[in-house]
Amino acid sequence: MDRKEMEKMDARIKTIKKAAEELKALSGGMQAVNRNVDRILASVKMLEINVTDLLW
């Protein structure tokens, strides 16, 4: 996999993270949403470790 593809994945990971954080902010404290967003963010963190960290 070349660097350009890795950079595209990095951008998409950042987009997913931002969307999840925005969803949590909109949830109004709804626990079901917050818990699921937390799971999404945990998965995003693993993606960051596997992809984003490799770029830097």
Image: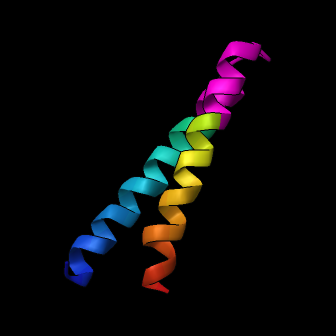
Q: Is residue 21 magenta?
A: no
Q: Is residue 18 left or right of residue 31?
A: left
Corner quadrant of residue 55: bottom left
Residue 13, horizontal then vertical, whole percent: 43, 55
Q: In this view, does 23 lie to the left or right of 7?
A: right
Q: Residue at x 75, y 13 (%)?
A: 30
Residue at the far bottom: name it.
56
Q: Which residue is drawn at 44% across and 49% down?
A: 15
In depth, the one of 26 and 29 nearer the eye is 29
Q: Main secondary structure of the magenta part?
A: helix
Residue 10, horizontal then vertical, whole percent: 39, 65
Residue at the far right: name it.
29
Q: Is 14 located above or below residue 6 in the figure?
A: above
Tag count = 0
Colour basis: rainbow
Q: In this view, does 31 lie to the left or right of 53?
A: right
Corner quadrant of residue 38: top right
Quadrant location of the N terminus?
Answer: bottom left
Q: Which residue is drawn at 52% across and 64% down?
A: 48
Q: Does the magenta stretch include residue 26?
A: yes
Q: Is 17 located above or below residue 21 in the figure?
A: below
Q: Is 1 located above or below residue 12 in the figure?
A: below
In depth, the one of 7 and 44 nearer the eye is 44
Q: Is 16 located above or below residue 30 in the figure?
A: below
- Magenta span of residues: 22-38
